[in-house]
Amino acid sequence: HLFRGFLAMGLRRVLPLALLSCAVGLRQRARALAVRGGTLRGGFAYGGQKKPVFYDMTHSNNAARVRLWLRLVDPALSQQVDSTFITYDDLRSEEYGRLNPLRKVPALVRGDGGTVFESDVILKYLEDLYGNNEAMTPNTAEGRQVMNLFIRIHDIYISSPNCSADGFCHSQGAMYLSTKWHGARRGMDIATREAKIAEIFKQLTWLEANKVDGSYLCGDLLTLADLTWMPTCVFMEFLLPRVFGWADPFGDASPFPRLAAWYRGLLERPAFAETRKEIWDYWVDMEQKGQFEPIVAEINAAPERKWTYP
């Protein structure tokens, strides 16, 4: 009798929690499956809310990671997000400033009207909202840790200036920004450019050494880390050989053979090939307009500095 009494007491405590957990899980699964099933249309996503709106820019590597996610997931899912491409004039508008106070891309307006900026936050929000954190997120704590570290390295040391004031720029900006072309607000002195080019090589070397064995950065699963790094690698593929004299960092003679195999493997998938072409074509256009000529002149005037790696 005493045992049955304890058992009944335990069940009274445990069953409500188990039922609640089950209900939450079923609700999340139903939400994801309802969207994946493609039954929701007409400008509304789940729960009768309006669709989120994603603000993109063709050549933005940070926006491109979200664009890739939308291209790679189930088409019924990607149709639950409206995308719109904007221009530099749009970035300077008061309207866009209310969406992203940093006046950068990307930005997202949620279905409930809330605004989201920073590409990694947008990407993980969409994964959480529609993919139940399963679409391109590892299912182990260790896998998620590796993925998040790869993303963090990219976002801190490659793609972010970590300061929104004039005169600060990201490491990637050393490949294409100049005072003559962009003005003092976005330009940099020669020592800064040299240091940032060295930083790009340093982080590629780290990524080469720490890539997990398999087809993708984190192993055999395509993750948000692949979507984060790949568009930026298009920048490097185009700019580092042309402007700084590197060998193709993802070609046959690459000093990063594991990354080169990873990059070429991604390009076999139509979504990655399409995204690469969009970014590549933009840089072709900028090259024809002379954007890189001030940087080349600066490099030629300082042969004592190191521009070519390894």
Image (tube, rainbow, N blue to C red):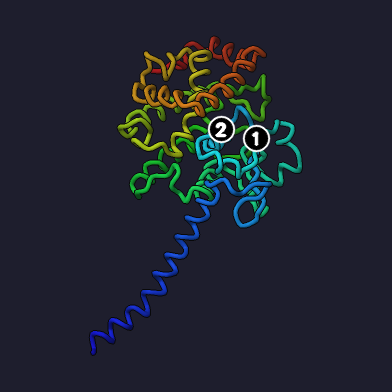
Could you tell me which residue is drawn at 51 percent across and 24 percent down? 273
Query: Vertical placement of 229 versus 82: above or below?
Result: above
Q: Quadrant of the C terminus?
A: top left
Could you tell me which residue is drawn at 46 percent across and 35 percent down? 154
Residue 77 placement, left or right of 90: left
Residue 67 lies in quadrant? top right
Residue 75: image location, x then y, percent: 55, 38
Instruction: Give residue 246's mark.
Output: none
Residue 256 placement, left or right of 64: left
Identify the element where label 1 is drawn: loop
Residue 223: image location, x then y, percent: 42, 39
Q: How dense is the environment of label 2, judged by Cα within 10 Å: few (below 14), some, or many (20 and up)? A: many
Residue 197: image location, x then y, percent: 48, 23
Q: Residue furthest right?
A: 94
Q: What's the CA distance linking mark 2 and mark 1?
A: 24 Å
Identify the element where label 2 is drawn: helix
Q: Which residue is mark 1?
A: 166
Residue 292 visible in the snapshot: yes
Q: Which residue is mark 2?
A: 64
Residue 70: image location, x then y, percent: 55, 38
